[in-house]
Image: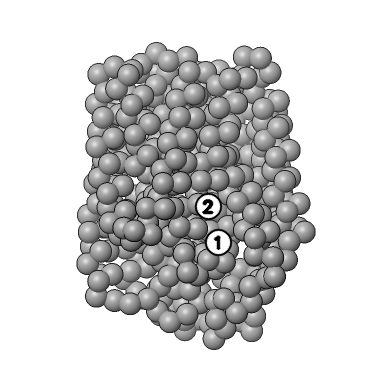
Amino acid sequence: MPSANSSRPASVGRLQGSAFAGMFLFGIVMAILGAILPSLFERIRIDKAEAGGLFLYMNFAMLLMSLFFGPIVDRFGFKLLLVASSLLVAAAFGLLAFAPGYSLVILAAVVLGLGGGGLNGGTNALTSDLNPDGRGSALNLLGIFFGFGALFIPFLIGTLLGWTGLARILVLAAALGMVPFVLFATSAFPKPKQPRGFPIREAKRIAGDPLLWICAFILFFQSGNEFTLGGWISTYLHEVFGLTPMAASLVLAGYWAAVMAGRLAASRIVRRTGHNPLVLGSAVLSLASAVLLVAAPGRGAAVAGALLIGLGFAAIYPTTLATAGERFAAVSGTAFSIIFTVALCGGMLSPWLAGTIAQASNLRRGLLISVLNCAMIIILQIVLSRISKKTRPSAA
């Protein structure tokens, strides 16, 4: 079996830079629906259940892409996937800018999900392969660029919406989508790790490893958290505490800034603490912050909860991926594909469920989903820590 590191390209730095650009674009993907929801409520008159449906459609498309990207990159390499994904995302931003009704917004959400799923899976798996001796640090650093992207759109909306309008902001996002397209198209990628065909026996072996599934379900709940809070914070602060759409977008930008700052810190802390203690501590902070956000008596406490929960979320996703990447280095694309598929089920269900509960009751109760998710991550991480002590990573 080919080694995970046997075909590294000559310009690893350029390729890693391209991955950073792709993750920046994926950050925009993840933040954009939540940032534009208040404007969509006014422009096309959708209700909360329909808004929750947009997250469902986008995440289902990501789920489909996640089912296939891993075996594709292990068999054929990363380039085609990442080039095509960048184009899909740029096209979706352009469609969102001018869609006159709900049906075209749904189409944009589906295209966004397909492209975003390819960028997320491809850049994470590529970064894991490029950094065999420091996956935890590298994946948290990659996550900082996710934070830059997720911060970018709500910041622009919060500062420029009244001056330039939403359509021009989305056109700018579409233009930015062409930057990683050019970088991926002109970069030299590693050769496929399984050029003679994908080993079905190896796939069955990793699918039977409990560590893979515990990592997957940690990210099931964490993905649900990130999609739910990233998607509903603006609307929650606007409806429950009376913040204007622009002010709520700035708080959302602050949430993503906290994620970014937390990942910068985690890229250094993880070298001293190891993966498991960092994730567990982050999950405990996330739980406390989610309770504060949902139970907040006033806008100050709610804003504090939103910012702290971003800090708590920061390290969970990339550090859990690093744990899986170390164990399944020889078929990292396939392992990540399985994990992302499970994770996106959580990302697909949680914001939809939050919207459905909010439509039937209120948004404060809908966001209780995140409190439950945080509690489940703590339980699963304790189990993962115990399993990790008894097992060693599989040979690459």
**Residue visible at 64% across and 23% down?**
166
Residue 119, how many percent across, how many down?
Answer: 60, 53
Helix or strand or loop: what does disc 1 sit on?
helix
* In this view, 130 is above or below 64: below
Residue 351 in view: no
Q: Where the N terminus falls, by quadrant?
A: bottom right
- Report which quarter residue 17 is drawn in: bottom right
**Residue visible at 72% across and 46% down?**
179
Residue 367 in view: yes
Helix or strand or loop: what does disc 2 sit on?
helix
Determine the residue located farthest toward the bottom in the rendered image.
1
Residue 313 got which mark? none
The residue labelled by disc 2 is: 142
Cα distance in 3D space between marks 1 and 2 = 8 Å
Residue 100, how many percent across, how many down?
Answer: 67, 26
Residue 396, how many percent across, how many down?
Answer: 47, 80
Are the residues tagged 1 and 2 within 8 Å (C-beta)?
Answer: yes
Which numbered disc flags the more N-terminal residue, 1 or 2? 1
Badge 2 local density, few (<14 within 10 Å), some, or many (20+)?
many
The residue labelled by disc 1 is: 127
